[in-house]
Amino acid sequence: MKYLGQTIELMQKDGGWISVWYHHICTIQVGTFPTANAAWDAATELIQRDLAVRGLLQVIDDWSSDNFITCQEYSLLEDSLVQFVVSV
C-alpha cells in the first residue's frame, strides 16, 4: 500500500499485525499491533514525522551553510529531530 508516496506493508502474524515501512534508506519494521488499523496508523504517523523532519533538516542545513548556527548546534538540532521521528 502507498501513503504519501511511501510503501507500507501490513502482515498478519501470530495473532497480531506487523507494519513494515519501505523507507528510501532502509526497511523499517514499525512493530506488531493488535489490529491492522493500529499497524497502519503507526506507520503513517512515522511517515508524517519523517517528512516533517526532512523539511526541517533542509532549513537547518541552510542555517549551517549561512553560518547562523554552529556545527554543535546543528548536531544537537539534528539529533533532536531524529529522536522525534523514532519516538512513535
Image (cartoon, rainbow, N blue to C red):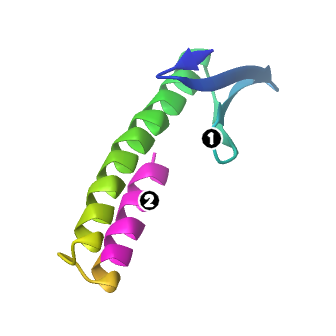
Q: Residues within 10 Å of mark 1 (few under 14, many from 20)?
A: few
Residue 50 vertical placement versus 43 (above, below): below
Q: Residue at x 63, y 24 (%)?
A: 8
Left or right placement of residue 43 versus residue 45 in this view: right
Q: Is residue 48 above or below residue 53?
A: above
- Of residues 67 and 3, the one drawn nearer to the viewer in this rendering: 67
Is 43 magenta? The answer is no
Residue 82 — which label?
A: 2
- Give whichever of 38, 6 is nearer the camera: 6
Residue 54, horizontal then vertical, whole percent: 40, 48
Mark 2 residue element: helix
Instruction: For mark 1, give the secondary structure.
Output: loop
Seen as rendered, the residue at the extreme right is 14
Range of magenta residues: 74-88
Which residue in the protein does label 1 denote? 24
At 51% from the left and 20% from the top, the residue drawn is: 3
- Horizontal side, residue 87 vs residue 25: left or right: left
The kind of secondary structure the magenta stretch mainly shows is helix
Label 2 or label 1, whichever comes before in sequence order: 1
User: On residue 61, which mark appears?
Assistant: none
View extreme (left): residue: 68
Q: Position of residue 72 (x, y in %)?
A: 33, 85
Cα separation between marks 2 and 1: 15 Å
